[in-house]
Image (tube, rainbow, N blue to C red):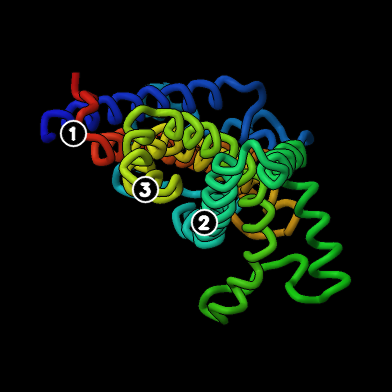
Amino acid sequence: MPRFLWRRLLTTILTLLAASLLVFVVLNFLPGSPAQVILGTQATRAAVRELTVKLGLNQPLWMQYLHWIGGLLTLHLGRSYISGQPIAPEIGSALSVTAPLVLLGLLVGVAVAMPTGVVSALRHRRASGTILAAATQLGIAIPNFVLGILLIIVAAVYLRLLPASGFTPWTTSVVGALQSLALPAISLGLVEGAILSRYVRTAVLGVLSADYLRTARAEGMRRHQALLRHGMRNAALPVITVLGLELSGLVIGAVVIEAVFTLPGAGSLLLSSVANRDLIVVQDLVMLVAAVVIVTNLLVDIMYRVVDPRIGLGS
């Protein structure tokens, strides 16, 4: 196990370095100058050159890259080109919205997918199983932002159960913050849960036809008892992989959902930074998303080893 962990950690570190280099190169080779954007089109060349030097953008790219990586490693993320304010508190404030939103969306997705997938697999030759499978297909077809708009109309406008937009800070009211995130999390989670449910159904159907499960039933166990006792661990393996991918999808989907519900999260900060060409903020946020995806893949591999130690992930 330690050898496996060391290998995966080394691979993860190298992947993070490659991702950081790709992010830096792509963003810094975009046309236009941040100094020109800040000063406007009427600025003189001398003023643009002076601001470029002040921002440190006249240095060689390799020096800028090393300075940026050093800041990431020490959590000194620099200052915004536009506002001049430190970036770390701004991103921290945005993550206090996005991180709970993604986790709540994941919980909603799992809560929907697991019972729906298992029941539709157990009853796949009955009308109820067919209806559940059709419902998940409908859920996959609906984009999460469309579902969010529908939830706003029904739950916020007509029923007045939850707020339609905005965010109550955690320091003001924990209950208010959770209420602000409820509809966005449901919008994210229902769609992702419908996708995950299909994989759960397929995995359980594969286990139900396995020889060891038929042997357990021949010994007198009911089908659902045999599945819970002997089959769920094997069924969990492909689901864990998809769950890791779904978490990445939730992070990306949060960008759109935050715009629909006007949440001050990382997605809204990213969109505003792109519009203002605040490249240093964009670099930090894109690298953060890449790190979440890469670390999630590492955790998925570790979970594979925990669920089934026979898998030789270290080889």
- Of 115 and 87, nearer the camera is 115
Q: CA distance from mark 3 to mark 2?
A: 31 Å
Residue 204 rendering spot, x and y as whole percentages: 48, 37
- Of 273 and 8, nearer the camera is 8
Q: CA distance from mark 2 to mark 1?
A: 27 Å
- What residue is shown with label 1? 5
Number of residues whose C-alpha sits closer than 10 Å to that of mark 1, classed few (under 14), some (14–19) or many (20 or more): some
Q: Quadrant of the C terminus?
A: top left
Q: CA distance from mark 3 to mark 1?
A: 38 Å
- What residue is shown with label 3? 221
Q: Residue at x 37, y 45 (%)?
A: 226
Residue 123 rendering spot, x and y as whole percentages: 60, 43
Secondary structure of the residue carrying numbered label 2: helix
Q: Earlier in the sequence, mark 3 or mark 1?
A: 1
Q: Seen in the image, is 108 located left or right of residue 225?
A: right
Q: Residue at x 42, y 33 (%)?
A: 207
Q: Quadrant of the N terminus?
A: top left
- What residue is shown with label 2? 107
Q: Residue at x 51, y 56 (%)?
A: 107
Relative to 177, residue 121 above or below:
above
Relative to 154, residue 278 above or below:
above
Q: Seen in the image, is 44 located left or right of residue 19?
A: right
Q: Are marks 3 and 2 in contact (CB under 8 Å)?
A: no
Q: Earlier in the sequence, mark 2 or mark 1?
A: 1
Number of residues whose C-alpha sits closer than 10 Å to that of mark 3, classed few (under 14), some (14–19) or many (20 or more): some
Residue 258 seen in the current view: yes
Secondary structure of the residue carrying numbered label 3: loop
- Of 258 and 278, nearer the camera is 258
Tell me the mark number nearer the camera, choosing from 2 and 1.
Answer: 2
Residue 70 seen in the current view: no
Q: Earlier in the sequence, mark 3 or mark 2?
A: 2
